[in-house]
Every structure is written in structure tokens, then in C-alpha cells.
Image (cartoon, rainbow, N blue to C red):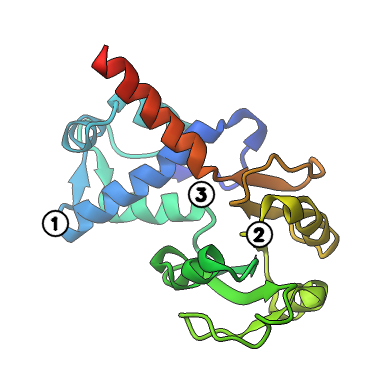
Amino acid sequence: MVAYKRHVDTANISELTISRLSIYLRCVDQLLEAGVETVSSQQLAKRFNLNSAQIRKDLAYFGEFGVRGVGYNVRQLRQYVVEILGLDRERRLVIVGAGNLGSALCHYSGFSGGNFLVVGVLDSDPSRIGDATPAGLLVEDAARLPEIVAQRQAEIGVITTPAAAAQTVCDRMVDAGLRAILNFAPIRLRAPESVLVKSVDLKVHLEELSFFLAHAEG
């Protein structure tokens, strides 16, 4: 029996738990592709090098999943994880910064397929406005951000500008009504508490890898 709580107190749920839910979704997708119909937390953990107790704890935030002695119905579990992650509807993105990274992200399968749809690529450089991206979208004037967000019902903003422009772009995204922002600029952004900003700093990850190599050599 599965009892899914649709309304949960997100304040008690850590970012690590949310990240693991994304991992569980990918694992469940692989099980479905392999034709697996039911799986226990122990089997799931062993197959994908996870922690069975952690799996049960993470899912327990959202309800009671599975049947004791039987495990989880894989297809049903996938459906609930999709709903928990809010992936049961299309999420529209607008990218500001039409340089190499911004253009590449338009073509990224994680954005262009599934539940995420890029509905606009914007830039403040007049020489770029009107250019076609690899995904076929035309670069538009960043000054039109509020209009584009409203007309195309964008929910997520993606910043791929140089660091010097990122905070200004973030402020404009907030003013345009975006409450979720993915930042690729190497700078820590300020935003209201009601807006979630996630930063992806490639240099930080490279430094983590460098740390590992330096101490592995020792």
C-alpha cells in the first residue's frame, strides 16, 4: 500500500534529500527499462550502490511507500517521485546570456527534452540579437525579459552571463517574477528568501577534484 502525502513541510527536507530523489528517479527509470516490476530498498541499494536505510528515510518524508516483505511497485514509485519533484508538468526556462555556454545549454538534452523547455534566449549585446542558437531559437533583447517571462509563462531563469553582469540579471529576473534561478556565473548572488538560487561553479568542482588528486598522491 502506498500513501503519498501531497503536502509536506519542505522546511524539514534538505537539499541532499532532494538530490537523492533525482538519483532514485534515474535508478527507477533503469529498472523499468530492464523490465523490473517490484524492488525492495535493499535490492535498490545493492544494484545502484546506495544506502537502503537512507532510501527509506528519504521516501518517508513524503508518505508510506511499498509493501513490507514485497517492496516497491517500480512503476508506481516512479510516478510518485515524479510528482514529488514537480516533474508531472512542463517547466519553462528562459536563458540570459547567449554566449557559448548559453547557446550550448539550449541544445542540452536535459533542457530540450522531457519536462524542461527553453522558451527564450536573451542577451544585451546588439550584435547577438537575432542570431539563431543551435536549438533553433533566435536570440532576443534582454530588455524584454519581463514581457517574455509573462507571455511564455517561464518559471526558471538561467544565468550564463559574465560575473560582472550576473547580479543585475538576477535582480531583473526577480523583478520579472521568476522564483527559481540557475546561475552559471562564478559569483555568489543575492536574492530574496522567496527566490531559490542554485549556482553551478565549474571551478569549484575542479578544485574538489584537484584536492582529491593531491591527497591521493600523498
Label ID, residue 84: 3
Q: Nearer the viewer, mark 2 or mark 1?
A: 2
Q: Do the residues under discs 1 and 3 have CB atoms within 8 angstroms? A: no
Q: Nearer the viewer, residue 198 or 55?
A: 198
| Distance Cα–Cα, label 3 vs label 2 | 31 Å
State whether residue 108 is above or below residue 133: above
State whether residue 96 is above or below residue 70: below
- Using the rendered image of the protein, determine whether residue 4 is visible from the camera's viewpoint: yes
- Using the rendered image of the protein, determine whether residue 59 is visible from the camera's viewpoint: no
| Distance Cα–Cα, label 2 vs label 1 | 41 Å
**Label 2 is placed on what type of residue?**
Thr
x, y (%) of residue 152? 69, 79
Q: Do the residues under discs 2 and 1 have CB atoms within 8 angstroms? A: no
Query: Around disc 3, counting alpha carbons within 10 Å, would you say few (fewer than 14), some (14 to 19), or many (20 or more)?
Result: some
On screen, residue 192 versus residue 180, left or right, reads right
**Label 1 is placed on what type of residue?**
Ala
x, y (%) of residue 170? 76, 54
Identify the residue shown where x is 62% and y is 28%.
12
x, y (%) of residue 75? 29, 56
**Label 3 is placed on what type of residue?**
Ile
Identify the residue shown where x is 75% and y is 56%.
165
Q: Nearer the viewer, residue 23 or 72?
A: 23
Q: Which residue is mark 2?
A: 161
Farthest residue to the front: give it: 127
Q: Which residue is mark 1?
A: 34
